[in-house]
């Protein structure tokens, strides 16, 4: 039997942390750890927050909710997800999520194959205080929109624009 890599371990509280807009992302496994097979992120999402609807050309995403209440929109379907829920979003469909609760929520995201972590590293900011996200500025949004296509990420304009 051929081995495709070596085992990897990321203990609780460890992993590279970045602020991606107002979400705290901790990389538990990256393509470097998994021979390019997948990335695993632990994400803390602020109340009433989430990304704009977007489409991945290259990756599938699987979300496992650990804390909080989320609404996922995937392929025109709205899915309410609480702790223990799993939501799968295949590549090529428009999707988003929102923390609909009053407290920060948390989920794990498995991205297959790996590679999208490079996008997060390019737009993310180092964490100095894991309790307070940095401000979201128009410049940060413009940067995100400008580099998305480099990573196979399409963010369509809102309806009516």
Image (cartoon, grey):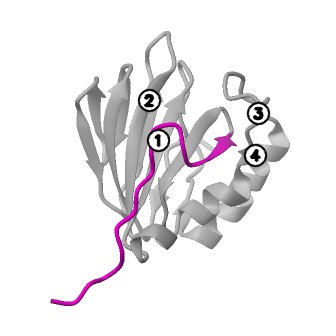
User: Nearer the viewer's eye, disc 4 or disc 3?
Assistant: 4
How far apart are labels 4 and 3 at the CA level?
Answer: 11 Å
Question: Which residue is the site of mark 3?
Answer: 136
Q: Earlier in the sequence, mark 4 or mark 3?
A: 4
Q: Which percent across, then down, holds residue 12?
A: 45, 38
Q: Which percent across, then down, holds residue 126?
A: 76, 45
Q: Earlier in the sequence, mark 4 or mark 2?
A: 2
Identified at 40% across, 47% down, the residue is 109
Q: Which residues are magenta?
A: 1-20
123 shown above or below 134: below
Left or right? Give the position of 59 relative to 1: right
Q: Which element carries disc 1, helix, strand or loop?
A: strand
- Mark 2 crowd level (few <14, some 14–19, many ≥20, 10 Å Cα): many
Residue 96 falls in image quadrant: top left
Q: Earlier in the sequence, mark 3 or mark 1?
A: 1
Question: Which residue is the site of mark 2?
Answer: 106
Q: Earlier in the sequence, mark 4 or mark 1?
A: 1
Q: Earlier in the sequence, mark 3 or mark 2?
A: 2
Cβ–Cβ below 8 Å for labels 2 and 1?
Answer: yes
User: Nearer the viewer's eye, disc 3 or disc 1?
Assistant: 1
Identified at 78% across, 34% down, the residue is 128
Q: Point out the residue furthest to the top here.
A: 102
Question: Which residue is the site of mark 1?
Answer: 42
Q: Quadrant of the N terminus?
A: bottom left
Question: Which residue is the site of mark 4?
Answer: 125
How far apart are labels 4 and 1 at the CA level?
Answer: 16 Å
Q: Quadrant of the C terminus?
A: top right
108 shown above or below 155: above
139 shown above or below 83: below
């Amino acid at each position: 039997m051929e081995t495709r890599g070596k085992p990897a371990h990321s203990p609780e509280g460890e992993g590279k942390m970045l602020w991606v807009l107002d979400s705290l992302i901790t990389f538990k496994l990256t393509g470097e750890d998994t021979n390019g097979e997948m990335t695993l992120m632990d994400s803390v999402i602020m109340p009433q927050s989430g990304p704009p609807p977007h489409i991945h050309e290259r990756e599938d995403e699987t979300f496992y909710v650990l804390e909080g209440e989320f609404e996922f929109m995937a392929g025109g379907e709205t899915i309410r997800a609480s702790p223990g829920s799993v939501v799968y979003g295949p590549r090529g469909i428009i999707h988003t999520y929102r923390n609909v609760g009053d407290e920060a929520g948390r989920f794990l995201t498995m991205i297959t194959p790996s590679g999208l972590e490079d996008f997060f590293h390019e737009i993310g900011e180092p964490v100095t205080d894991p309790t307070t996200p940095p401000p979201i500025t128009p410049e940060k949004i413009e940067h995100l929109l400008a580099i998305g296509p480099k990573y196979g990420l399409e963010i369509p304009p809102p309806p009516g624009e």
